[in-house]
Image (tube, rainbow, N blue to C red):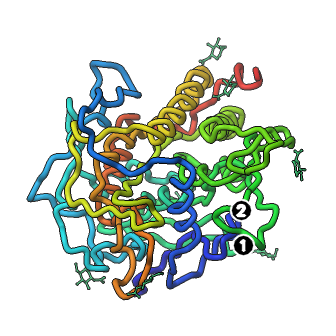
């Protein structure tokens, strides 16, 4: 049996739009590099330090008071807890997140479970999940941290069903698998900015090259798939930190770190907000899309002891408590920008009968500085200067996102996506 039938969308040539699919041996690709590099170069002070006088944690961003919010809680040590899979499980674990394989010595980071304040988050049950998504098509749309969750899901399902790769050979940015006994289709769509981007000088691509970003143009790679998606999980964030020229209606409206005095600087949060607005507007206006839509919130990184490029790393071996750490600074800005865009769209979505859900993982993940690969995402013999404090070890706390996913699917109730379900067309053409 092949041990790794699943190839990953990834990029190695530095071009956002041309992921290399058949790469068996990864070097740290520019995707990750750009992620690691762009994050903080431009954001200023970014090292995490435990809080001395914590303010109140970021508030509840979903739901009402009497209903349990599964996203508010604490990490609880559970010595008995077993991982859903290991580095020996036949599933894809990207080497760069395979902390067991590369000899991460501590194992306590695998033993913490998420305990919501007012209820429990059930353990993941692969059969229950596969029954919930039987006959459905689930798409992860976004960047490499979204891919991290997708791969975690495949591994969490591996005990019960094994995916068959059904990728169309002509698709470079879309990977597809089917889990035969359940006729469940899993799709991974590479769209790290969600809106269209173009590098005016692709041959000179670098982390500092200035790309064009068309804030009102959703990326076609995912819009063209909407007719075929029942559940969509959107996530994007880290790529927005790089330099950009921003366009709307085809016209240059400003830039971010372009270093040209005649061009207006636009806040990256503003651009981030617009990109999400465009994404939600597209979903709302697309008559054939009746899917259940999740926005998975910003995934915080945890560089300490320096910046990403001068020795910054993430060596902690236990979570923070809520008293020690909370979202703040630019992480809080990214998070609240996203949540605000979501809330704005949700009002409209309710009227139009489109189901938008917030998978509000940021507050849990800010507490997990111990969950990243650090230097255990490559052989110790590779002299890599950058630690990865952005992605998440597999297994590891990222598996909790799929516990949330199953719980949220169950909250939709039986038959959460009825094939007979109709959008309210009365309102569809109002804009
Ligand atoms: C799994 O990890 C262990 C150490 O935790 C290591 O000894 C073993 O070689 C790894 N196996 C694979 C297939 O990576
Ligand atoms: C499998 O699911 C797809 C939609 O995801 C559906 O079109 C197809 O008819 C299903 N096949 C079977 C055999 O149920
Ligand atoms: C891939 O593209 C080629 C050339 O356009 C076409 O002939 C072929 O049918 C395509 N294959 C699939 C599986 O779509
Ligand atoms: C800004 O100035 C640069 C160099 O002076 C010029 O190349 C560019 O076209 C100008 N851009 C705009 C939008 O005016
Ligand atoms: C919706 O589906 C119909 C029938 O398949 C198709 O003709 C139409 O072009 C689709 N509309 C959009 C916006 O994709
Ligand atoms: C997008 O932004 C516009 C302008 O701020 C706002 O009127 C509209 O409701 C937003 N749409 C969505 C789907 O959030
Ligand atoms: C690792 O690389 C850095 C610079 O890239 C170099 O200064 C250092 O000497 C190298 N260390 C080893 C053990 O090769
Ligand atoms: C559809 O929207 C219209 C206009 O807001 C509203 O009057 C009607 O009750 C809605 N229909 C359904 C089935 O929700």
Residue 230 in the image: above or below residue 428: below
Is residue 5 visible from the viewing direction of this image? Answer: yes
Q: Is mark 1 within 8 Å of ligand 3?
A: yes
The residue depicted at 20 percent of the width and 56 percent of the height is: 318
Where is residue 347? Give x, y as percent: 57, 21
Residue beneath disc 2: 209
Where is residue 148? Give x, y as percent: 44, 61
Image quarter of residue 287: top right
Viewed as shown, does residue 18 lie left or right of 371?
Answer: right
Where is residue 403? Give x, y as percent: 31, 49
SS for callout 2: loop
> In the drawing, what numbered circle is on residue 170?
1
**Figure quadrant of the C terminus:** top right
SS for callout 1: loop
Q: Are marks 1 and 2 in contact (CB under 8 Å)?
A: no
The residue depicted at 57 percent of the width and 66 percent of the height is: 31
**Figure quadrant of the N terminus:** bottom left
The crowd level at tag 1 (other Cα within 10 Å; few <14, some 14-19, many 20+) is: few
> In the drawing, what numbered circle is on residue 316?
none
Q: How many marks?
A: 2
281 and 183: which one is in front?
Answer: 281
120 and 312: which one is in front?
Answer: 312
The residue depicted at 42 percent of the width and 73 percent of the height is: 96
Where is residue 212? Give x, y as percent: 77, 53
Viewed as shown, does residue 292 lie left or right of 225?
Answer: left
């Amino acid at each position: 049996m092949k041990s790794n039938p699943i190839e990953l969308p990834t990029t190695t040539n530095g071009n956002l739009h041309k992921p290399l699919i058949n790469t068996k041996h990864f070097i740290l690709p520019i995707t990750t590099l750009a992620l690691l590099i762009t994050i903080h170069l431009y954001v200023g002070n970014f090292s995490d330090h435990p809080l001395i006088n914590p303010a109140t944690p970021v508030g509840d961003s979903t739901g009402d008071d009497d209903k349990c919010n599964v996203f508010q809680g604490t990490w609880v040590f559970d010595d008995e807890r077993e991982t859903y899979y290991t580095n020996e499980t036949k599933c894809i674990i990207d080497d760069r997140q395979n902390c067991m394989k590369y000899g991460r010595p501590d194992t306590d980071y695998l033993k913490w479970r998420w305990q919501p304040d007012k209820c429990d988050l059930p353990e993941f049950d692969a059969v229950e999940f596969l029954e919930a998504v039987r006959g459905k098509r689930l798409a992860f749309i976004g960047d490499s941290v979204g891919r991290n969750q997708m791969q975690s899901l495949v591994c969490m399902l591996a005990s019960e069903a094994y995916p068959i790769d059904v990728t169309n050979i002509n698709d470079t940015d879309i990977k597809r698998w089917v889990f035969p006994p359940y006729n469940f289709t899993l799709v991974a769509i590479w769209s790290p900015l969600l809106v269209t981007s173009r590098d005016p000088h692709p041959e000179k691509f670098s982390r500092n090259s200035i790309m064009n970003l068309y804030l009102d143009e959703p990326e076609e790679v995912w819009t063209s798939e909407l007719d075929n998606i029942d559940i969509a999980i959107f996530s994007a964030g880290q790529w927005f930190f790089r330099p950009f020229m921003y366009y709307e209606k085809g016209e240059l409206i400003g830039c971010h770190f372009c270093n040209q005095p005649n061009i207006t600087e636009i806040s990256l949060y503003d651009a981030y907000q617009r990109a999400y607005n465009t994404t939600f507007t597209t979903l709302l206006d697309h008559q054939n899309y009746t899917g259940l839509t999740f926005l998975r919130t910003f995934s915080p990184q945890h560089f300490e002891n320096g910046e990403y490029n001068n020795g910054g790393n993430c060596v902690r071996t236990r979570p923070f408590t809520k008293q020690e750490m909370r979202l703040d600074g630019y992480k809080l800005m990214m998070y609240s920008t996203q949540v605000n865009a979501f809330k704005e769209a949700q009002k409209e979505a309710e009227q139009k009968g489109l189901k938008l859900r917030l998978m509000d993982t940021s507050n849990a993940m800010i507490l997990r500085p111990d969950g990243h690969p650090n230097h255990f995402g490559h052989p110790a013999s590779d002299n890599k200067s950058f630690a990865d404090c952005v992605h998440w070890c597999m297994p590891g706390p990222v598996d909790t996102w799929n516990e949330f996913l199953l719980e949220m699917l169950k909250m939709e109730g039986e038959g959460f996506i009825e094939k007979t379900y109709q959008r309210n067309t009365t309102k569809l053409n109002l804009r």
